């Protein structure tokens, strides 16, 4: 007999970055949370950064889902996230300091791997060694994310659930610390860390975290079955994905939409609409190939304009973001990988005032023309971008909330991008505040 579906089940949206991160996902998640009962982070750690501007007040989030800015919305940290408990509590306290109710609405999966002090030391020592050896830095944030994921894959990680069992935690910590201390004092030429301070601090933070521990996957399943809408919030961007990005200049987790299921403990049948977030130009933080990159140092150049007008500095690191024209050939790759239902174009207003605007529609690689980003990072580095050029616009797009009120050339620019990538533009962000949004098709309402 055919199984009957639950007619009352909610509708769920996955938000992912389609470039090298920093696309403005936080604002969009915050905007969509009006229609969601729950928001869940499903990968990454506090190497992510979402900046929200609400009524002119700027708030930066790193680990806690952006939905925390909306009263009454439940927020979840899924099993695919690596958690630094000290940072998590610090972020909670900072948000409570501005009057937000956090602890009663935040749920942390017991299966999350922990980031501990030796992960941070290993991460930083590796980057320093790569720099001095001439191998070139990967460009990590130095927060221990990669080493924590390594322990997870090697099946030796300490997880959040271990905090509930002090003896078990101590035994696993001794073994793991001994392993990392060998690397720190040997190959990495750094210093060993001591067991007792790490253990004592972990037990102290455990008492604060225990009330927030939860079976996240089952809770999300239950919310959805009774009709609640869920928003899955990705971090970083598709081109930083550990499998599909410009490896090795990538992050340590899967940033793509398919991981929303595995990273939160639900089935892929709960992923109904995939919203890709894309800047109207392209940026990248840290090392790695970037075909459309522009020089930014000289005032009056396009690169300088994008950097300064767009205020392009990393939310987490403060590092200046490298800037360049929109790479629609790279965007095409992201749309395929994620199964994008629709796009939200952000920071359109940064292009205001440019006399002409370019879009990369392909590359010349080894004497041949290709129309999609290659899979090999060395090939990406060798790509010479091929551009379509469009006339710019002098009128402002800042704060515009209706498509027809955009300058004609801005609409033509977006329409050409949409045509090339083969995915609809359903939303346009024209400023940092919640209200600075043009809605063409609602991800929740269809």
Image (cartoon, grey):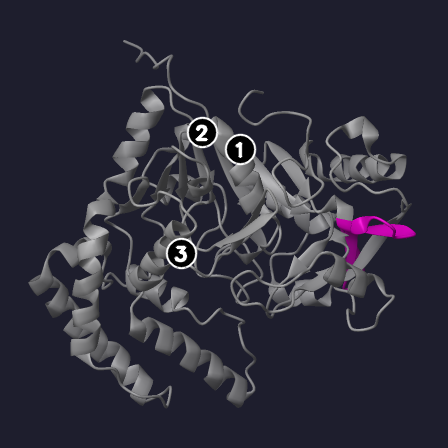
Q: Does residue 366 lie above or below 407 as drawn?
A: below
Q: Secondary structure at mark 2?
A: loop
Residue that numbered label 2 is attached to: 36
Image coordinates of residue 334 in percent, x first then y, are 61, 46
Q: Quadrant of residue 321?
A: bottom right
Query: Crowding near pointer 3: few (<14 within 10 Å), some, many (20+)?
Result: few
Report whether residue 191 is seen.
yes
Residue 12 appears left or right of 109? right
Q: Is residue 103 magenta?
A: no
Image coordinates of residue 279 in percent, x first then y, are 68, 48
Report whether residue 339 is seen.
no
- Alpha-carbon distance for marks 2 and 1? 7 Å
Report the span colored magenta: 350-370
Image quarter in which the N terminus is found: top left
Mark closer to the observer (2, 3): 3
Q: Measuring 56% from the left and 80% from the top, which residue is drawn there? A: 136
Q: Measuring 58% from the left and 61% from the top, which residue is drawn there? A: 246
Q: Secondary structure at mark 1?
A: helix
- Alpha-carbon distance for marks 3 and 1? 23 Å
The tag earlier along the polypeptide, 2 or 3, is 2
Q: Is residue 361 magenta?
A: yes
Residue that numbered label 3 is attached to: 94
Q: Quadrant of residue 106?
A: top left
- Alpha-carbon distance for marks 2 and 3? 24 Å
Pointer 2 and pointer 1: residues touching (CB < 8 Å)? yes
Q: Which mark is residue 32?
A: 1
Image coordinates of residue 317 in percent, x first then y, are 53, 67
Residue 212 appears left or right of 47? left
Q: Residue furthest top?
A: 1
Pointer 2 and pointer 3: residues touching (CB < 8 Å)? no
């Amino acid at each position: 007999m055919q199984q009957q579906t639950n007619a009352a089940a909610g509708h769920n949206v996955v938000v992912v970055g389609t470039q090298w991160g920093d696309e403005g996902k936080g604002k969009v998640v915050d905007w969509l949370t009006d229609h969601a009962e729950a928001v869940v982070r499903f990968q990454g750690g506090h190497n992510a950064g979402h900046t929200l501007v609400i009524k002119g007040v700027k708030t930066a989030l790193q680990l806690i889902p952006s939905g925390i800015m909306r009263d009454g919305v439940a927020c979840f940290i899924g099993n695919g996230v690596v958690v630094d408990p000290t940072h998590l509590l610090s972020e909670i306290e900072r948000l409570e300091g501005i009057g937000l109710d956090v602890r009663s609405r935040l749920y942390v999966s017991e299966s999350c791997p922990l980031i501990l002090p030796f992960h941070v030391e290993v991460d930083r020592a590796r980057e320093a060694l790569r720099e001095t050896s001439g191998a070139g830095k990967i460009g990590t944030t130095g927060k221990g994310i990669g080493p924590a994921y390594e322990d997870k894959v090697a099946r030796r990680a300490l997880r959040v659930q271990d905090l509930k069992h002090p003896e078990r935690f101590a035994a696993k910590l001794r073994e793991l610390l001994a392993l990392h201390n060998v690397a720190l004092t040997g190959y990495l030429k750094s210093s060993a860390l001591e067991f007792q301070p790490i253990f004592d601090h972990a037990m102290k933070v455990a008492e604060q975290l225990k009330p927030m521990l939860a079976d996240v996957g089952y809770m999300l399943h239950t919310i959805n079955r009774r009709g609640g809408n869920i928003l899955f919030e990705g971090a970083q961007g598709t081109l930083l994905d550990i499998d599909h990005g410009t490896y090795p200049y990538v992050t340590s987790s899967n940033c793509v939409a398919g991981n929303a299921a595995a990273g939160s403990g639900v089935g892929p049948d709960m992923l109904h609409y995939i919203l890709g977030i894309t800047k109207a130009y392209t940026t990248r933080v840290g090392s790695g190939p970037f075909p459309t990159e522009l020089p930014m140092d000289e005032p009056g150049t396009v690169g300088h304009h994008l950097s300064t007008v767009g205020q392009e500095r990393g939310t987490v690191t403060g590092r200046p973001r490298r800037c360049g024209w929109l790479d629609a050939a790279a965007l095409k790759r992201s749309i395929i990988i994620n199964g994008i239902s629709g796009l939200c174009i952000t920071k359109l207003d940064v292009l205001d005032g440019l006399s002409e605007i370019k879009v990369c529609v392909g590359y010349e690689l080894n004497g041949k023309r290709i129309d999609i980003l290659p899979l090999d990072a060395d090939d990406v580095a060798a790509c010479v971008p091929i551009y379509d050029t469009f006339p710019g616009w002098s009128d402002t797009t800042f704060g515009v909330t209706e498509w027809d009120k955009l300058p004609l050339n801005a609409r033509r620019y977006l329409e050409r991008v949409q045509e090339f990538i083969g995915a609809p533009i359903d939303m346009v962000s024209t400023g940092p505040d919640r209200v600075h949004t043009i809605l063409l098709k609602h991800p929740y309402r269809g």
